[in-house]
Amino acid sequence: MFSSDQETHKALNSLTTAARDQTRPLIIWVGAGVSSWAKYPFWNNLAEQMHTVFSREERNYDGVFSSRLLEGAKYPELFEQMRIANQSRYFTFLSDQFRPQHATGVYRRFIRAICKIPNVYIVTTNVDEALEHSLPEHITIQRSDIERLPQLLHQRSKFICKLHGSVSSVESMIFSTHDYESLQLENGYLEAIQSIFSNTTVLFLGYGLRDEYVFRNLRACSTIRPLFGVGPHFIVTSEERNELPATVRRIRYVPDATDHRDALQVLEVIADFASSQSIQVVNEGKEEVSSHHSIYYLADLITPGSWTTSQTLNLEPFPGAVQPQVIIGEGYVNGEIESYNYSALHDIVVGLLCFDIVCVSIDHLARVHDLLGPEAFWIFVENGSLRLVIPPSVSAIGFFDEQSPIGGLMMVDLDILGKKSLPSVSERIRFQILPAAGKEKIAEKLFQLLEASIFDVSKSKLSNSVIEKTLGALMNPSIRRMLGISQGTPRNVIPRWLSFPALRLAKVISSGIICQHIQASSARMIFGSEKQASVAFSATETEQWAQDAASYVLTGRFNSDVGEIIRKNPDLLFGIIKFRESSTGANFRRETAQSLAADNGSQIVTAINSGLNQAIPVAVLQQARDQFSGLFIPQKNSSLSTPVVWGDLRNSDTQISRWRKRSRTLLEAEIKRQRLGPYDECPCGSGEKLRFCCQDALS
């Protein structure tokens, strides 16, 4: 997620403006961090490997001196020692390290983002050729032809400029001290670098901006063209980097993954603000799925009837102080949701058919127990198919008092709302399910079994992470635009009229943290939350859904409401239990997991709403259908031959537009209360005119 500091907030706004207006060409400067997503080594890892080999096997290699260079991270000097010791072996080792690799899901995600940005140009200091292979429509410029670069920029011809050479021409690669010294004697090369910094906007991605000659040229350009201005340029980094030139704006992110895939969200923001166009991408294929159990997390579970989704509470005031107020819950109202085509039982059955384990929040325990029925419910618990999750604390928006127009995100537990202490897990289970008379001892054993299998994601660190990640997500200009938050609204500020969209985002972030913690393969989200998740976590919403596959197994047709079928014939649940235990059922779940594995480059390795990158093979579907039909469904049962049509809830954009409409109504009520005009200062605290701030964002 993005850092919530003010510099990042302003830099993101400036970058999206530059990408949208295209007043200067946008260049993506790709460094070793990007190539690491394609399994190529960083310089420090490469240097360590080569140093170990040369120390052991090359008698002309000064191992002691070179060890000091390695410890001091003086890599060009270290590579120079290796080149002097055995030039042939030096080049052979480099060639071997940068041979073609099978791209990972993260690298494919990077290429997808690049392809969505029109008129984007790439320069890279990487010597591997993954970019050229993945983007065949781009012209490749080697350093010997770099004088062509200004002309190609003028012609708007897409290119990949190899600043430090390519592995296919090993002597062109820049690694050693001698290489860098020779590079800085090439006047044409240095002029091209200055032209880039003077006439374009550069986004440094996966590049530390630590090459001295690059840093020096950046500083020089700011003095050469002070009247016309330079840049702005941007660097995506997880570090503070206070020493950067004034022309370079820092976009900081907080890394969730060790491979720093979080940096990719910047490209995805740019793509969202620029019109897309089709670019041919070489198909890299999909990776093998990991061997652990596939897990399906039901983030939302709604049952028929009336239900409350939010509360506004006045807290106990401190002595002599005003009474603070908090808003809790997602606050859905009838105008924002459509539940007529939603079935909680359908979602549960889809999970049981397509995944090894189905997980639900402990708060939904009673609902799941009632939907499945006691007998089937406890069978699924005993065989490990059904497990509970204790989610992080509840998200809330806190206000100074009931009249405050702006507030802040916070996490609350029951004790802050007047309870003396939080109930234990055991108490929460027993509160929702009551044993039948005379069955208390049997029930106690089952309760203990259920409790022992729980995933606990309620730890304080994880709860605090919900706030940090939500604030980071709210820095994303794409999310702000989606929710109707003005770019001028101060960071970390939640206007009262946007409380519910912010809390819904926090719920999505919380679900994402749960998915990471339990290693979920898929998450089911509804009412527009799936659209937020696809942006916040870069997860994929795709055309084929697991529910279609589950529908086919049960009915022989796609897009059926399997929940309604189970409701009419509850004995089918026991057929599902037997099907899960069969080899065909296991193979069916494995195929589902392999299809989902195609999205393993996202922020959370999960697909939203069980999106399948491609349909499960027809033969596997038919085999599963035949197995289920032959064993458990009487062929003469005609009631299953005409399934109820199931709505798949793929209307996220429509749902979220209703959120903005409601927020606009709440804003207008606040405007009326404060008697504000369109040219008065916006109550969000931006300092901008109301008409051009929150009113404009929600129009």
Image (cartoon, rainbow, N blue to C red):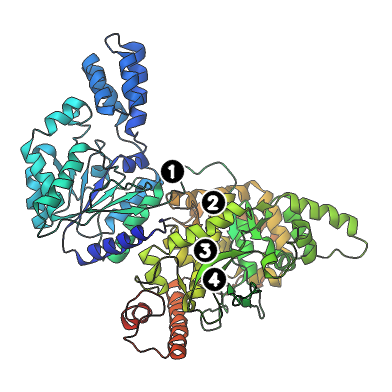
Q: Residue furthest top?
A: 59
Front residue of this view, candidates 21 and 248: 248
Q: CA distance from mark 3 to mark 1?
A: 27 Å
- Of residues 332 and 137, the one nearer the viewer is 332
- Whether residue 610 is visible, yes or no, is no
Mark sitting earlier along the chain (4/2): 4
Q: Nearer the viewer, mark 4 or mark 2?
A: 4
Where disc 4 sits, the SS reads strand
Q: Around disc 4, counting alpha carbons within 10 Å, would you say few (fewer than 14), some (14 to 19), or many (20 or more)?
A: many
Instruction: Kindly report which numbered mark, 3 or 4, lies closer to the viewer in this rendering.
Output: 4
Give percent across and percent down for residue 149.
Answer: 10, 48
Compared to 383, does 189 lie above or below? above
What's under tag 4, amino acid-wise? Ile
Tag 2: amino acid: Gln
- Look at the numbered disc 3 and give the secondary structure of its residue: helix
Which secondary structure, mark 2? helix
Q: Which of the labelled discs sits on residue 437, or is there none?
A: none
Residue at mark 3: 508
| Residues at circles 2 and 3 in contact by the CB criterion of under 8 Å | no
Check contact, mark 2 vs mark 1: CB within 8 A.
no
Q: Which mark is residue 397?
A: 4
- Cα–Cα span, label 2 and label 3: 12 Å
The residue lying at 34 percent from left, 11 percent from top is: 57
Residue that badge 2 annotates = 516
Q: Which residue carries the number 1 mark?
A: 287
**Residue type for callout 1:** Glu
